[in-house]
Amino acid sequence: MSGRRVAVTGLGLVSPYEEAGIDAFFENLLNGRSAVRFLQTDDVPRPLAMPFVMCQGFDPGAALGKPLASMMERFSQLGVAAAFEAWADAGLQREADAPELRDDWDCLWGTALGGVMAFEKGYRDMWQKGRERLSPLSVVMGMNNAVNAHLSIQLGLGGASQTYTVACASSSVAIGEAFRRVRSGEATVAITGGSDATQTYGVARAWDAMRLVSPGDELTAPAACRPFASDRRGLVLGEGAAALVLEDWEHAVQRGARIHAEMVGYGASCDRSHLVRPEAEGQVRAIRAALKDGQLNPEDIGYVNAHGTATLEGDPTEVAALKVVFGDRAQALPVSATKSMHGHLMGAGGAIEAVTTVMSLCHQAIAPTANLAGRLDPACGGVDHVFEGRRQVPFHAALSNSFAFGGSNAVLAFRSAGNAPHGGKS
């Protein structure tokens, strides 16, 4: 589709790895290192004990300053910190020092559960501790658009401020819609991405009740998430955040910005068939829509970051969709599911995988699906699964898939900045 070109000029995240920063995160993925650990809590009436992904090294006071951090729930702290990192990576100034008017600069964010921790704390304070009064900040900390509100204020963004809640596709939808607004000229710059913090008793028990959460103990937790494996047992919940700065290409070039990649396409669809059982036909339509939107052919794609949650039905359905779209070429199509290492970050999942996809293009390197070697389910065969170490291979375009409960599908397409016409700095 014609319109302005869209540059990715900033990347940021808060990841579960001890080392901070994008480069350390991507290096851990390339090395196949799992961030999944065994979580034990002292919750009443029954403690949680399950494989989980937590950002244990994250200090919100250090990242945001204690006054600002104290006004935020966990998902906002993670999201704003990731966005600040992406903003700095893009070489953009904070609002107080900004010389330009930002009336058409947007903030579009995704979250599946938003401030669930704030509200669960309120329920516990009332019903377990007998408190009659809750924090006056409970509502503004728990509202799903809290990240947007803080970012728009802190960065002086006067454009659209919108929150997308589309289950596990939330942040991919937010990124896709931000891309559309920049491409159409409605926005010059957009900060976009997603965040979620799901380590609450109620959330964990709800997911466990669906029999979708992988079991494990302290010893086996790092290998608990095994997408496409014959012995996969389900997903691993986690918390985290990731952000991208999308920018009008000419604006980025004029200010001398480093361009990580070009975002070229976005496809969305609905399976229209079942709340929790995915359908390949709907995913096919989303993938084809992203390719068409980006004016890409299937043979242009050199890597797919799969949704790959390690659920029994989800993994073979996604592979089936890829085989329909890519035909005979599917057998040579590199595919990996990095949730095997960073877990399923719910509303933040699409954003952290979009960042991973952009980094893969920048470094011409593909991270593996961990825990897959020697375990491939024949029902998930027919594509080129990357399952051992890093793979260095030249490629120029890639897709990032997100397929959510409710049948909502979102696919993002990126192209190497060096391969784009009049390619950007790298």
Image (spheres, helix red, strand yellow):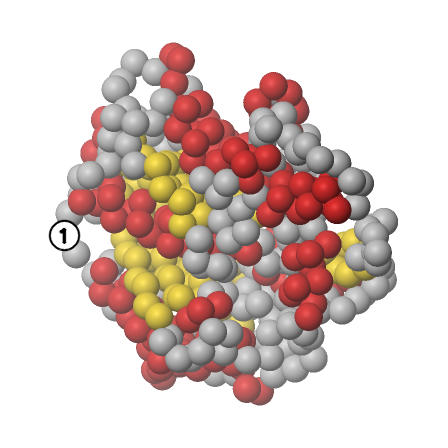
- The residue nearer to you, when weighing 159 against 324, is 159
Quarter of the figure that contains the C terminus: top left
User: Does the image show residue 112?
Assistant: yes
Q: On the picture, is 390 further left or further right than 181?
A: right
Position of 227 compared to 91: left or right?
right
The count of marks equals 1
Where is residue 286 shown, x and y percent of the image? 33, 68
Where disc 1 sits, the SS reads loop
- Quarter location, residue 373: bottom right
Q: Is residue 302 visible?
A: no
Residue at point 56% right, 47% down? 196
Q: Is residue 112 above or below residue 156?
A: below
Q: Which residue is mark 1?
A: 2
Instruction: Look at the image and tell me in which quarter the N terminus lies.
Output: bottom left
Residue shown at the point (74%, 40%) measured from the top left: 125
Q: Amino acid at mark 1?
A: Ser
Q: Residue furthest left?
A: 2
Which of the pair 207/140 is nearer the observer? 140
Spot the residue most to the bottom. Answer: 378
Residue 225: percent from left, percent from top = 67, 66
Residue 421's spot in the image, x, y percent?
A: 21, 46
In the image, what residue occupies the spot 38% across and 62% down?
410
Residue for point 32% across, 68% down: 269
How many residues crowd around disc 1 within 10 Å: few (fewer than 14), some, or many (20 or more)?
Answer: few
Residue that extends furthest to the front in the rendered view of this protein: 132
In the image, residue 191 lies at what x, y percent? 38, 36
Left or right? Give the position of 157 relative to 75.
left
Could you tell whether 107 is left or right of 339 in the image? left
State whether residue 207 is above or below residue 88.
Answer: below
